[in-house]
Image (tube, rainbow, N blue to C red):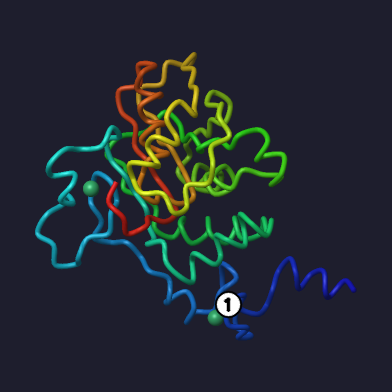
Amino acid sequence: MLKRILQRIYPQNCVLCGASSASEAGLCVDCQADLLANPTACARCALPLAAASRHLLCGQCLQKGPVFDAAWSPFIYAQPLEWMIHQLKFNGRLLYAKWLAELACKQLPQLDEIPDCILPVPLHPSRLRARGFNQALELARPLARALSLPLDSRHCRRLIHTSPQTGMDAKQRRKNIRGAFSFENPAAYDYVVVFDDVITTGSTVSELARVIKREGVRRVDVWSLARADKSW
Ligand SMILES: [Zn+2]
Ligand SMILES: [Zn+2]
């Protein structure tokens, strides 16, 4: 019994392929190599760019930048990472947050300026009750610790329980999320990093950045574990 419990908490086997050599983050060396890193991303929105791209920015950001100032996503949203994030969010497997954060902490962002805090994208209270935890907060916590940055999960709220955005295009997503957040800035933050588990088209983090900047914050960056290969 104890062995079974320990095996569930600290699996020796790779959670993806079952190989008996899981080294870290629940994965064997081969499965870790299958994760798609995002080393040549757009500096502004983290959209994956072709390795040979001569530009630092994607086509969309070259024309007109997003409301946030910079973005960082160490991974591209694809399998097998997608499955691991799914285990965390929809199967309540909180241990995956620890593993996914471990993977992100292996390639921390270069900081050209020190943010005042990391602000995880909040869930609506009813979704938080249903899920039992906020995956963005669970993933951001180890990152904040590794970078010695404060974590702020108090001053931003989700006011509207928005419908899931899967299947919506970028324009529909922007409309769906408009007015969903409130933010107070009693600590007079100047530079805030917004953190989400996945950035798909960036509509959620853009809306949050807009609300945060309205409260006098000069710079808002967005970080996520993974970035979908979709323009914002
Ligand atoms: Zn494996
Ligand atoms: Zn871009």
**25 left or right, relative to 79:** right
**Quadrant in the rendering for residue 116:** top left
Q: Residue at 45%, 43% (x, y): give it.
A: 147
Q: Residue at 69%, 47% (x, y): give it.
A: 131
- Residue 166 coordinates in the image, percent (x, y): 47, 52
Q: State the SS at label 1.
A: loop
Q: In the image, is the residue at mark 1 within 8 Å of ligand 1 by its beta carbon?
A: yes
In the rendered image, the vertical position of residue 136 relative to residue 185, given as above or below: below
Kind of residue sitting beneath label 1: Leu
Number of numbered discs present? 1
In the rendered image, the vertical position of residue 149 relative to residue 223, given as above or below: above
**Quadrant in the rendering for residue 23:** bottom right
**Quadrant in the rendering for residue 202:** top left
Q: Observer-nearest residue: 168 or 29?
A: 168
Q: Observer-nearest residue: 127 or 15?
A: 127
In the rendered image, the vertical position of residue 230 relative to residue 10, given as above or below: above
Q: Residue at 87%, 71% (x, y): give it.
A: 2
Q: Residue furthest bottom?
A: 19
- Residue 53 coordinates in the image, percent (x, y): 13, 62
**129 left or right, relative to 213:** right
- Residue 28 coordinates in the image, percent (x, y): 54, 79
**91 left or right, relative to 197:** right
Q: Residue at 42%, 76% (x, y): give it.
A: 33
State the quadrant of the N terminus: bottom right
Q: Residue furthest right?
A: 1
Query: Circle 1 sits on which residue?
Result: 16
Dot 1 alpha-carbon crowd within 10 angstroms: few under 14, some 14 to 19, many 20 or more:
some
- Residue 174 coordinates in the image, percent (x, y): 37, 37
